[in-house]
Image: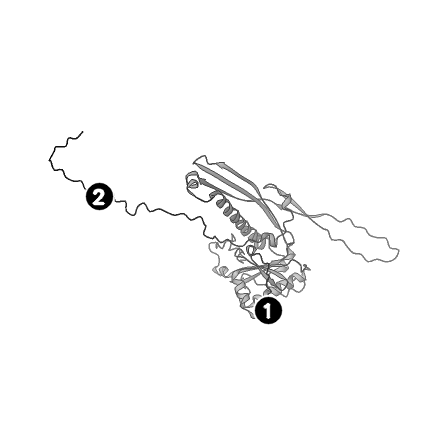
Amino acid sequence: MATITPGAVYPVTNYADTTTAYSGTFIPTLWSGKLLAKFYQNTMLSEICNTDYEGELKNQGDTIRIRTAPSISIQDYTAGMNLVTETPEPIYQDMQINKGKYFSVQTNDVLAQQSDMNLMNMFTEDAAKQLKIAIENEVFYNSFITEGAAAANSGATAGAISAGYNLGTDVAASTKANILSTILQMSAVLDEQNVPEDGRFLVITPNQRNALMSSNIAQAYFTGDQSSVIRTGKIGMLDRFTVYVSNLLPRGAADEAWNDGLGSLTPGASASAVDRTMMVAGTKHAISFAATISKTETLRNQDDFGDKVRGLAVYGRKVVKDDALVTAVVEA
């Protein structure tokens, strides 16, 4: 213990000089309980595809057999003749449930404790929306390009009866100035295939909508829909089509330069493909689609302190009536 001598003078220590300056280091952070809005691309598969078979879907690897009513022959009749009786053969197509997409996210116990939001709910809600977008992107590309519309429902000589409608090609796309005429031709092509008027849809890009609505004639044709569902991109009626706007439509490239539906050019492909976008119309009878979240599970993270949640979506799609689908290629 130090001894203090009476009357002695001792130096005063300047503690300000010997301690660390903390000014500006410990500034408290205020965490907001509100989230900044996040915008997602419109999804509309359930609006333009038939989903009649989703109830039969259970697992990836399933095959759904879709039956089609056979065509019955009509014969001429004369009195006393022997009737010819036919035995209709069953017609079916198989839709493979051979696609799958998943998500897997985790939360850290410490971060979750510090947060005033339910992080796991926030993550899984975002994952579910991103799953829908990823699946729709793949379905659109393969349905409209890989399988596509009937031969008579696309190209420069479309029309099952007349072959008189030019719906554009990747080499010679329809111009934006002619976009309304192209849409009306798409309607006529469906008419020549005897496709019912009820339930017809048209999917266009924002760029095509802009070109379309720049025309006074188009605005006269266009009728609004007060009950439009914003999340599906539905914007109204044009001719006999319910019109949807989507950023997910694939680029129209006959040489499949846009090989993944996301706008990634194949190396060496012509840059002119960049200026082509598709426009698609038809009815729900054209494409069958089935999807389900086959597994969702929560578990503890073995490598950290926290929880994991992961989900698996399995799905399949098939163009089952290509004569009820029509595609056009338009300059971007």
What x and y, as percent, mark residue 91? 70, 48
Disc nearer the start of the sequence (1/2)? 2
Using the rendered image of the protein, determine whether residue 324 is visible from the camera's viewpoint: yes
Q: Is residue 251 above or below residue 2?
A: below
Q: Which residue is mark 1?
A: 220
Is disc 1 placed on a helix, strand or loop? Answer: helix
Please name which of the two marks, 1 or 2, marks the residue nearer to the observer.
Answer: 2
Query: Which of 262 and 146 lies nearest the eye of the viewer?
Result: 262
Residue at x-position 50% and y-position 40%: 309
Q: Which mark is residue 16?
A: 2
Query: Which of 130 and 192 lies nearest the eye of the viewer?
Result: 130
**In this picture, residue 194 sits left or right of residue 237:** right
Q: Is residue 201 above or below residue 53?
A: below
What x and y, as percent, mark residue 178? 56, 67
| Colour scheme in use | one colour
What x and y, as percent, mark residue 186? 62, 62
Query: Which of 247 and 237 lies nearest the eye of the viewer?
Result: 237
Going by the numbered disc 1, the residue's amino acid type is Ala
Residue at x-position 52% and y-position 61%: 206
